Image: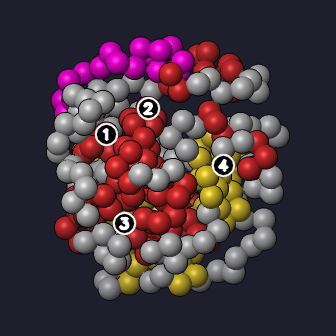
């Protein structure tokens, strides 16, 4: 496994030349941050119904909008495995019957990449910028990060450590796939949670979670919860983590923050394969060892 540790905004481990990786669903944390910057600036409200509704931005960010997810489609996984060209977004939505909500918004919880596709489109519409430029202006530049990009084609994955995957088209991640150094993933989360980009009131809402039940088998979560683009809750050993796990063909990442007194530490871990629990457990171990 590769890892990077950051404490109070500064790296504790040297950057590695092979540590530019796919951020997978940690991209959702970045999308949520950009969307909340629009809320901060008064350009949109968390609880107003969206034109794509009948759901709100808060419900999209918390996976409470009632939307299904394209990962449920067997044809989706088969097409990815055959290295086919990604379907146009409208075809994906049609195959999924995405306009048919699976429950009334706010009344349930269901992880949905489609919900974050709506978030990405909202960011573009409200900011007037292409998604990559919007994320740079609203998240990366203010946090002092410069080596992150959206991967749109297989060429964009040249030089990126994709684990065991030999071919992958990032167009299959409809909300966008960020790639960048592992250390910048850790710095992104660490600096976000200082309150310099988003006010503490917004950060508090970001970490206000819907509890999703008790312990998860073979994963370190004791009482996992999901907030606004953040997984948050207690793990084995009693530590509270905030961050996100993500995975795709060939690899898994886990980027998590933990606070001890006035000190905060963030760990980003990358591994080949598909074992999310093992990668999360390694993040918990590294964070725990840092505070011993």
Q: Which residue was labeled with disc 4?
A: 151
Mark on residue 286? none
The earlier-in-sequence mark between 2 and 4 is 2
- In the image, residue 255 sits, relative to residue 76, either above or below, namely below
Instruction: Estimate the x, y position of residue 198 in percent, counting from the top left.
Output: 30, 69
Number of the front mark, 1 or 3: 1
Residue 135 colored in magenta in the image: no
Q: In which quarter of the image is residue 21?
A: bottom right
The earlier-in-sequence mark between 2 and 1 is 1
Mark on residue 60? 1
Between 109 and 238, the one nearer to me in the picture: 109
The earlier-in-sequence mark between 1 and 4 is 1
Between 250 and 134, the one nearer to me in the picture: 134
Q: Distance between the residues labelled 2 and 4?
A: 18 Å
Instruction: Estimate the x, y position of residue 196 in percent, counting from the top left.
Output: 34, 78
Q: How far apart are marks 1 and 4 (CA)?
A: 23 Å
Q: Which residue was labeled with disc 3?
A: 239
Q: Distance between the residues labelled 3 and 2?
A: 31 Å
Between 243 and 91, the one nearer to me in the picture: 91
Q: How far apart are marks 1 and 3 (CA)?
A: 27 Å
SS class, disc 1? helix
Q: In which quarter of the image is residue 213?
A: top left
Q: Distance between the residues labelled 4 and 3?
A: 34 Å
Q: Which residue was labeled with disc 2?
A: 114
Number of the front mark, 3 or 2: 2
- Quadrant of the frame with the N terminus: bottom right
Residue 37 shown left or right of residue 270 in the figure: left
Residue 38 in view: yes
User: Residue at position x 25%, y 45% from top?
Assistant: 58
Span colored in magenta? 91-108
Residue 69 shown left or right of residue 279 in the figure: left
């Amino acid at each position: 496994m590769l890892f990077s540790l950051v404490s109070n905004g500064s790296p504790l481990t040297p950057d590695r030349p092979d540590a530019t990786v796919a951020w997978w669903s940690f991209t959702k944390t970045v999308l949520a941050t950009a969307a909340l910057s629009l809320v901060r600036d008064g350009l949109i409200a968390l609880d107003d119904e969206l034109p794509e509704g009948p759901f709100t931005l808060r419900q999209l960010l918390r996976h409470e909008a009632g939307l299904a997810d394209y990962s449920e489609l067997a044809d989706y996984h088969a097409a990815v495995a055959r290295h086919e060209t990604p379907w146009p977004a409208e075809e994906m939505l049609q195959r999924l019957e995405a306009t048919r909500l699976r429950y009334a918004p706010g009344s349930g919880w269901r992880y949905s990449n489609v919900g974050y596709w709506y978030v990405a489109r909202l960011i573009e519409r409200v900011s007037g910028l292409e998604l990559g430029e919007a994320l740079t202006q609203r998240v990366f530049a203010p946090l002092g990060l410069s080596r992150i990009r959206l991967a749109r084609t297989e060429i964009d994955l040249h030089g990126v450590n994709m684990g065991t995957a030999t071919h992958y088209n990032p167009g299959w991640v409809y909300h966008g796939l960020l790639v960048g150094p592992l250390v910048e993933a850790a710095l992104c989360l660490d600096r976000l949670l200082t309150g310099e980009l988003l006010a503490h009131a917004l950060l508090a809402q970001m970490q206000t979670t819907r509890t999703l039940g008790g312990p998860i088998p073979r994963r370190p979560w004791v009482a996992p919860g999901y907030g606004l683009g953040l997984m948050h809750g207690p793990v084995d050993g009693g530590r509270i983590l905030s961050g996100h796990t993500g995975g795709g063909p060939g690899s898994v990442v886990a980027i998590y923050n933990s606070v001890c007194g006035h000190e905060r530490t963030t760990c980003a871990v990358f591994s080949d394969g598909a074992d999310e629990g093992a990668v999360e457990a390694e993040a918990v171990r590294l964070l725990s060892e840092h505070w011993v």
